[in-house]
Image: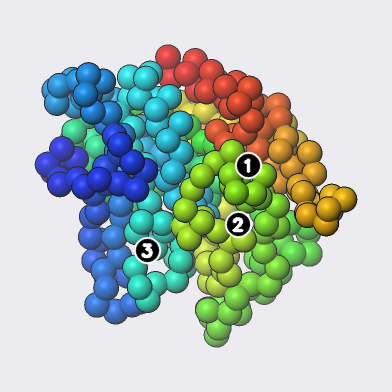
Amino acid sequence: MGTSIHDLDFVPDLLGEGYEQTTVELGDDPDGEAPGTPVVTTLVRYRPSGEDAGSDAAYAGRPAMLLVHGMTDFFFQTHVAEHFDALGYAVYGIDLRKCGRSHRPGQTWHHVTSQAIYDEDLSVALSLLGAGHPSVVPVGHSTGGLDVTMFVARLHAAARRGDAARGVLHGVIDAVVLNSPWLDLQFDGFTNFVIRQVFPKVAKVAPAWHVPGGINPTYGRTLHVEEFGEWDYDREYKPLLPRPKQVSWLVGVSREIDKLHTGRFSTGVPTLLLCSDADSPGRSTKATDGVEVPEEIAFLTDTILKPSQMRDAAHLVDPDCVVVTVPGAMHDVFLSRPEVRETAFQAVDAFLG
């Protein structure tokens, strides 16, 4: 399959001991930002040192797992990497172009005008991992779940048309795991109409116009250890309030979702979809000392997307998609409270086992 992930040079990563990163240049930005500055994708691997490391041959013999983040996100979930490492996987995280470690000066954070642009990042990662390991399991979260779904589905469709190169890539994929994937527009009917019918016209004349509204910061406040959560991560890479999004970005997401809903796609591999049992607005309330505290329900529900839509769209991902509803899960099920995420881990372990 060409160059192996093991042929690349890795350097220590910000996540600390056992984590290393490598950066792959992908050429000019198809969206034309920061001329002269190539877009890059960053792969982070977890490979513990010392007696846990194993031989190079043993490590290469492990199946690989590729963790793909969502919107305004990056790879930081060390507990996920370490869980699946213990299960026997060589675990890698990816920071897609303009996200997290892959952002460069002059680039708009997390911006692409078509989600299919990420196919290049994922193709490079899959090719490198496929040349270095016997198989790969992509795990996509939120927007990354949509991206993984459509990327694998496009490989599957190309393979069925006789595209040998893409067929080889699709053949490397052993299974797909989706963690609260963004499979439908979660807004009211009028807003969805505006996004689908009005915003494409706006994007033609003012592609950089910032979309009004945005995500309630309560979700981030339920996550970060300096707020009310458990997790310590770089808030430059994952701010509590997502950065403003351009209308051309939202139109690109909407079009990718609409492609999925044509019913012409399928991953063609065993696929698991994890989601919460409920959604909520995730508001905060003021405590007696004046500090805004997230409501308890924000820690027990998806405050970003609607799990019911994920379950309804699962058959569009693949006719045999397995859906596991995790009671009490947050938007990123692996960042839920300990007993809840343990349920999620057990579901994935059983599915992959």
Q: Residue furthest bottom?
A: 205
- Residue 286 located left or right of residue 187: right
Q: Mark 2 or mark 3, which has the lower sequence index?
A: 3
Q: Quadrant of residue 302?
A: top right
At mark 1, the secondary structure is loop
- Residue 84 located left or right of residue 339: left
Q: Pointer 3: residues within 10 angstroms few (<14), some, or many (20+)?
A: many
Instruction: State the residue in front, 286 or 178.
Output: 286
Q: Which residue is mark 1?
A: 229
Q: Amino acid at mark 3?
A: His
Q: Which residue is mark 3?
A: 103
Q: Which residue is mark 2?
A: 240
Which circle, 1 or 3, is nearer the viewer?
1
Mark 2 and mark 1 residues within 8 Å of each other at the beta carbon: no
Instruction: State the residue in front, 263 or 237.
Output: 237
- Residue 169 located left or right of residue 333: left
Q: Residue furthest right?
A: 288
Which circle, 2 or 3, is nearer the viewer?
2
Q: Amino acid at mark 2?
A: Leu
Mark number for residue 162? none
Residue at the image position 30 percent from the left and 65 percent from the top? 39
Q: Amino acid at mark 1?
A: Gly
At mark 2, the secondary structure is loop
